[in-house]
Amino acid sequence: KQEVTQIPAALSVPEGENLVLNCSFTDSAIYNLQWFRQDPGKGLTSLLLIQSSQREQTSGRLNASLDKSSGRSTLYIAASQPGDSATYLCAVKVFGNEKLTFGTGTRLTIIP
Amino acid sequence: GAGVSQTPSNKVTEKGKYVELRCDPISGHTALYWYRQSLGQGPEFLIYFQGTGAADDSGLPNDRFFAVRPEGSVSTLKIQRTERGDSAVYLCASSLTPAAEQFFGPGTRLTVL
């Protein structure tokens, strides 16, 4: 059974700093990995999707990397802003199964 | 519409009542998913539709839960004899194909008193 872990559960950093969020998964036979953002009381916004054949994806100040062999992904946020404050969730899809398995998320607070 | 929409946004009901939650996927998306998110947790998979048929319903917790997608577009999640433990946010997602990126709606917050 695929298990997804995100550590830490919460993180606070001063505005302007670069930061890294971590995601680990137990079954390396993944099809893709998706990073989401969730604001309080809201749905999920897709940030980046990495296919199993890719090592990283970039969108603006966000960069996601994938290391299947070690079962890890990181989300790098450059030059953090207060508007980046939210919960960040990673989710994986394995071959032959269309559902996403989610971690419990990291609640990020950017301090102005 | 531009994104996935869900109605109602909030639903309060009493224990033992029947509820229906609606999801309108992105136009043209063939795959539709339902997830449930409890407070402080990540979403958990309930059921996945490809077209009109339920391709995977392994996440439905028991037979009180049922979902339909009769015309391959709008889907309804139905919960019978609601229990307090059913209280959660129910999220719907759709994707162009089963392998593609999933896009989520804003969710329906269900509270069972």
Image: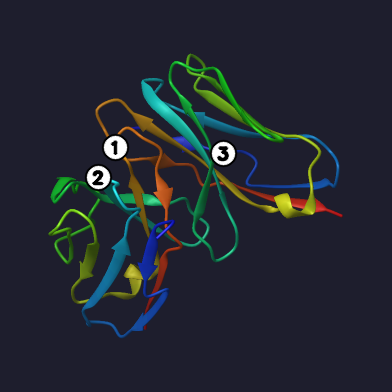
Is the residue under label 1 in contact with that under label 2 (CB below 8 Å)? yes
The label number, if any, that marks residue B30 in the structure image: 2
Q: Earlier in the sequence, mark 2 or mark 1?
A: 2
Residue that numbered label 3 is attached to: A6
Q: Residue at x 46, y 31 (%)?
A: A33
**Secondary structure under badge 2?**
loop
Mark drawn on residue B29: none
Q: Secondary structure at mark 3?
A: loop
Under circle 1, the secondary element is loop
Q: Is residue A83 left or right of residue B89?
A: right
Same subunit, labels 2 and 1: the answer reads yes
Q: Which residue is mark 1?
A: B97
Q: Is residue B7 above or below residue A84?
A: below
- CB of mark 2 within 8 Å of CB of mark 3? no
Q: CA distance from mark 2 to mark 3?
A: 30 Å
Residue B67 vs residue B41, the one in the foreground = B67
In the image, what residue occupies the spot 57% across and 21% down?
Answer: A56
Q: Amino acid at mark 1?
A: Thr
Is A86 left or right of B113, judged from the image as shown? right
Q: Residues within 10 Å of mark 1 (few under 14, many from 20)?
A: some
- Residue B77 in the image: state x and y as whole percent: 24, 65
In the rendering, at what x and y percent does residue A21 appear?
65, 36
Q: Amino acid at mark 3?
A: Gln
Q: At label 2, which amino acid type do we have? A: Thr
Q: Is residue A54 above or below residue B29?
A: above
Q: Which chain hosts label 3?
A: A
Q: Position of residue A18 (x, y in %)?
A: 79, 35
